[in-house]
Amino acid sequence: MNSRFICGSLFLFVFSGISQADTPAPAPWHPQRAALMTQWAADVSPDNALREYPRPQMERPEWVNLNGLWDYAIYPADEATPKKFQGKILVPFPVESALSGVMKTVGAKNKVFYTRTFRLPESWKGKKMLLNFGAVDWDCTVYINNKKVGQHTGWGKAIAHCV
């Protein structure tokens, strides 16, 4: 099973209609430099970006962590989907942060798209799945393979029940 994602910040979208051939390769990821960095910032990489289960007391036996590198694009809010992606963002860090690798302000007139392709374990075929975004900005719409599977408005979590 393949799934392709694009998420956005002010209007968070996950969409699957853009093929790899439609977009040039985004710039490689690297952390940005902020005025204040902790001693641990240098240890953060795409290979170790918050890999532990988010709520250990509620851990499920089967789960997949989607933290890591995603392609991103910041576009005007009135555009449906981006024509190309601008670089790599390290999830779970917010687009404004140095550790995301982006460190840009989105603003009220723009939205952010994220996209990622991943393969689910074969043993999950035919099972119901829960897609959980631990934090979103204000509005989140989730698409998997061009099908809308969830939406959230307000502060907090976005959850999509995938069948």
Image: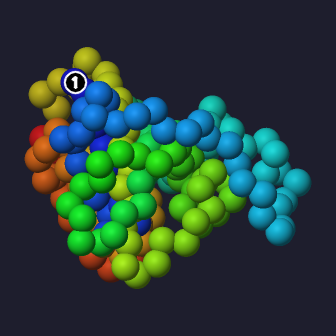
- Which residue lies under the disc numbered 1? 1
- Residue at 11%, 47% in the rendered image: 147
- Quadrant in which the N terminus is drawn: top left
Residue extending furthest toward the top? 122
Residue 46 seen in this snapshot: yes
Question: What kind of element bears circle 1?
Answer: loop
Residue 78 is situated, as x and y percent measured from the top left of the image, at 24, 71
Does residue 158 appear left or right of residue 74 in this picture?
Answer: left
Residue 71 is situated, as x and y percent measured from the top left of the image, at 44, 43
Does residue 72 appear left or right of residue 4 in this picture?
Answer: right
- Residue at 83%, 69% in the rendered image: 35
Q: How many marks?
A: 1
**137 above or below 33?**
below
Nearer the observer, 134 or 39: 39
**46 above or below 12?**
above
Residue 139 is situated, as x and y percent measured from the top left of the image, at 30, 72
Corner quadrant of residue 2: top left
Disc 1 marks a residue whose amino acid type is Met
Residue 52 seen in this snapshot: no
- Residue at 62%, 62% in the rendered image: 103
Q: Residues within 10 Å of mark 1 (few under 14, many from 20)?
A: few
Nearer the observer, 30 or 141: 30
Residue 11 is situated, as x and y percent measured from the top left of the image, at 31, 69
Nearer the observer, 29 or 141: 29
Coloring basis for residues? rainbow
- Quadrant in which the C terminus is drawn: top left
**107 above or below 31?**
below
Does residue 24 appear left or right of residue 37 in this picture?
Answer: left
